[in-house]
């Protein structure tokens, strides 16, 4: 509604000067106007005054900047004077009209505008008309506060609350809140699955009225109520829910008691969570930790725990029990011929045989690939023997068929008695294991009982001691090297051109264990490759440090197992590169028996390493049955004549003839010869007469420690 009152405008500075006012009054008015402008310019709010035609008569810097003008440029302009693309007003004009019509203050909580940069802003605006004495509108005051940041935060909060509500409504968990009277003020999720009645509106209900009539919940209401009344946090309170299909879900309740700043109780916030799968998973993990995944039998770790328990029970009850250690015979044939799937299937069927031959209270376990253990608790030895004989007979008669193939396996069993004299479970396992090994040595597919006076068991026990010593030596760097010179027979005064490294072990007490004692054990128990790798690595580094720029050759022994190792070639090449050792300065010694037993692998490794300059020697030549027949196939550089022929060469004409023939054959094939066990000058003279190239033994140089 347009006012008909006389238009009144605020004069500018020039107009003030034209008025017939005293100069003091004019100066004061100008001063007051500048002060007013300075004051409103300092205010961050958008402040403007418009006349009845909608033109600006007063603005501060904040609103002028929003429009893209200075304060002076904006004065006198109306909506039609401002390009629409600079300030796209979405509600201002309509609000202005409402203010004029109603002639009263209007507050717009959320007025949206788009500024000159195209950015959407939220304003909280107050528009107020100003009237003259005749109640005629002469100006309109507008004050706007930029609440964009606040509005964005509010929007984010709304979205966050909505997000939480969506999550709560769709989550498997049930979120809930109780007020101070312990009535539900909020509850989410599948609550009706628990209470079983969709017609019940849960809010405002107490937990008792909500759950007490449910036929599905197995809930201890009294215990739960006591917890609530104590106003304490709820931790892991569980209850069950039974469904029509007879399945049971287990739920866990956790909640926090809420207090205000005055420490007044305001209620609870908590969650009800199904732990059925979690509990099932934990039970499965606990089961898997104790059982073999393939057969379902107890595993080695659990078996040893049960053995410890039985040992303690034996000492308390003074009643013997029996430990049986079983190792399948010829099982590898099934894996190699029919594959691991067939082998796994056979193991499962054999486990069924084992379980069928023992009592329900007995314990059977899978201890390794094809190794099993049985604890016959409270069982006399005579009964245990009968059980073992039945197992051997049943397995021996069983025919396994797979993919039109038929297989038969056997089993060797070692038996150890668990009585009050048994030291510990490790010793009992060791006795049974060694007895099983003895059963295999005696022909397999039989049983052997461990006795304290069994010499074979005692010998095997000492071997296990060496197994421990070897492991300890490798892990704690107690395997050290010695060197023994290999001298030129034709010129004994020359510097040593060649030496062999020999390994020794220093036990925990400082005693030296010779190769004769530990090498055989290392080979038997599959540890020799680790020993050889350790020696190679250590020998390479020593030789690099001592003889880096010389032509001295170092000889290192390789066992038959190491020659068959598919990764040994890669390891040697890697060590050569790491130490920057000249390949020409390295010579590997392979025993004749090892080379012949793995002739193809020996030829392969010799050929590939010789291609880069590494030398080879055939050790202990003459000890095999077909030495000369294989010699032509092995491209070695040196032939080491077995010391058994050399040490008696002075007295024994036959030994002398053999050494002579070996030397002649070697020379014909372009090889140099090295005689072992050269103990004195008499032997040395004969070797020189025969034409042997090098000598090694106490007569020319004793071993000395180097690392």
Image (cartoon, helix red, strand yellow):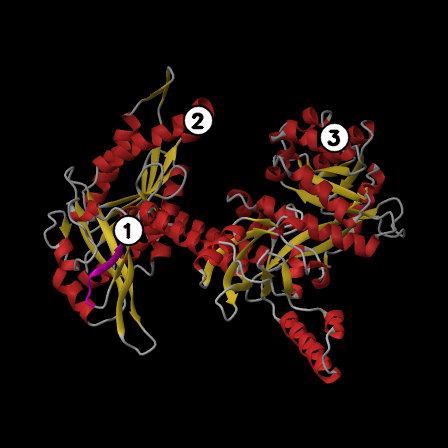
Check if residue 186 falls in the magenta segment: yes
Residue at disc 2, secondary structure? helix
Q: Residues within 10 Å of mark 3 (few under 14, many from 20)?
A: some
Q: Position of residue 424 (x, y in %)?
A: 34, 59
Q: Specify which label sits upstream in the sequence, 2 or 1.
A: 1
Q: Position of residue 131 (x, y in %)?
A: 51, 67
Task: List the residue tagged with mark 3.
Answer: 607
Task: List the residue tagged with mark 1.
Answer: 188
Q: State the residue lying farthest toward the bottom.
A: 24
Left/right of residue 261 with respect to residue 480 in the rendered view: left
Q: Nearer the viewer, mark 3 or mark 1?
A: 1
Residue at the location (78% across, 31% down)? 666
Q: Position of residue 702 (x, y in %)?
A: 74, 56
Task: List the residue tagged with mark 2.
Answer: 333
Nearer to us in this view, 439 or 7 = 7
Residue 44 in which image quadrant: bottom right
* Residue 647 visible in the current orientation: no
Residue at the location (45% across, 64% down)? 105
State the separation of the CA atoms marked 2 and 3. Answer: 31 Å
Q: Residues within 10 Å of mark 1 (few under 14, many from 20)?
A: many
When the figure is inspected, residue 624 is found, relative to residue 263, above or below; the finding is above
Residue at disc 3, secondary structure? helix
First to last magenta residue range: 181-187
Nearer to us in this view, 286 or 246 = 246
Q: Specify which label sits upstream in the sequence, 2 or 3.
A: 2
State the separation of the CA atoms marked 2 and 1. Answer: 62 Å
Check if residue 285 falls in the magenta segment: no
Nearer to us in this view, 253 or 446 = 253
Residue 514 in which image quadrant: bottom right
Residue at disc 1, secondary structure? loop
């Amino acid at each position: 509604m347009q006012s008909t009152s006389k238009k009144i405008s605020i004069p500018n500075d020039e107009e003030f000067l034209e008025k017939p006012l005293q100069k003091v009054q004019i100066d004061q008015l100008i001063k007051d106007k500048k002060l007013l402008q300075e004051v409103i310019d300092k205010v961050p709010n958008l402040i403007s005054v418009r006349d009845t035609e909608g033109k600006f008569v007063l603005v501060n810097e904040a609103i002028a900047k929003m429009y893209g003008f200075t304060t002076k440029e904006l004065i006198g302009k109306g909506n039609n004077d401002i390009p629409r693309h600079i300030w796209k007003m979405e509600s201002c004009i309509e609000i202005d009209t409402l203010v004029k019509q109603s002639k009263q203050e209007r507050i717009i909580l959320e007025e949206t505008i788009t500024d000159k940069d195209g950015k959407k802003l939220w304003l909280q605006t107050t528009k107020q008309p100003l009237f003259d004495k005749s109640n005629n509108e002469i100006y309109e005051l507008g004050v706007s506060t930029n609440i964009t940041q606040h509005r964005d935060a509010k929007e984010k909060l709304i979205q966050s609350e909505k997000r939480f509500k969506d999550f709560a409504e769709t989550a498997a968990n049930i979120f809930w809140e109780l007020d101070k009277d312990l009535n539900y003020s909020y509850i989410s999720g599948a609550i009706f699955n628990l209470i079983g009645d969709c017609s019940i509106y849960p809010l405002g209900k107490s937990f008792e009225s909500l759950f007490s009539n449910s036929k599905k919940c197995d809930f201890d209401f009294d215990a739960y109520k006591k917890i609530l009344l104590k106003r304490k946090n709820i931790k892991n309170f569980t209850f069950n829910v039974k469904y029509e299909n007879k399945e049971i879900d287990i739920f866990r309740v956790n909640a926090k008691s809420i207090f205000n700043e005055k420490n007044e109780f305001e209620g609870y916030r908590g969650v009800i969570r199904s732990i059925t799968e979690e509990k099932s998973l934990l039970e499965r993990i606990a089961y898997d930790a104790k059982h073999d995944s393939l057969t379902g039998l107890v595993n080695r770790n659990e078996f040893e725990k049960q053995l410890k328990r039985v040992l303690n029970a034996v000492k308390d009850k003074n009643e013997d029990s029996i430990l049986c250690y079983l190792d399948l015979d010829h099982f590898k044939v099934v894996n190699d011929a029919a594959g691991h799937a067939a082998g796994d299937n056979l193991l499962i069927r054999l486990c069924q045989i084992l379980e069928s031959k023992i009592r329900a209270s007995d314990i059977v376990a899978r201890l390794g690939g094809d190794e099993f253990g049985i604890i016959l608790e409270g069982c006399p030895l005579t009964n245990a023997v009968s059980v073992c004989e039945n197992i051997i007979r049943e397995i021996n008669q069983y025919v396994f068929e797979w993919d039109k193939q038929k297989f038969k396996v056997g089993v060797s069993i070692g038996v150890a008695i668990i009585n009050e004299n048994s030291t510990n479970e490790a010793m009992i396992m060791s006795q049974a294991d060694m007895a099983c090994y003895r059963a295999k040595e005696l022909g397999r597919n039989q049983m052997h009982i461990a006795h304290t006076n069994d010499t074979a068991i005692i010998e095997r026990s000492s071997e296990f001691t060496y197994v421990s010593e070897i492991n300890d030596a490798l892990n704690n760097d107690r395997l050290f090297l010695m060197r023994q010179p290999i001298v030129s027979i034709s010129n004994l005064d020359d510097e040593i051109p060649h030496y062999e490294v020999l390994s020794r072990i220093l036990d925990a007490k400082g005693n030296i264990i010779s190769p004769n004692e530990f090498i055989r054990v290392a080979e038997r128990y599959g540890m020799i490759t680790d020993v050889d790798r350790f020696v190679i690595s250590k020998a390479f580094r020593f030789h690099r440090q001592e003889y880096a720029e010389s032509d001295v050759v170092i000889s290192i022994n390789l066992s038959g197992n190491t020659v068959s190792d598919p990764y040994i070639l890669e390891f040697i090449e890697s060590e050569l590169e790491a130490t920057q050792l000249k390949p020409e300065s390295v010579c590997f010694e392979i025993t004749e028996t090892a080379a012949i037993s793995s002739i193809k692998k020996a030829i392969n490794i010799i050929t590939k390493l010789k291609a880069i300059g590494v030398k080879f020697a055939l050790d202990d030549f003459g000890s095999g049955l077909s030495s000369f027949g294989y010699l032509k196939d092995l491209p070695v550089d040196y032939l080491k004549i077995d010391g058994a022929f050399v040490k008696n060469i002075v007295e024994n004409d036959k030994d002398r003839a053999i050494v002579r023939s070996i030397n002649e054959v070697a020379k014909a094939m372009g090889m140099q010869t090295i005689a072992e066990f050269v103990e004195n000058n008499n032997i040395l003279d004969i070797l020189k007469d025969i034409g042997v190239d090098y000598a090694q033994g106490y007569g020319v140089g004793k071993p000395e420690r180097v690392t």
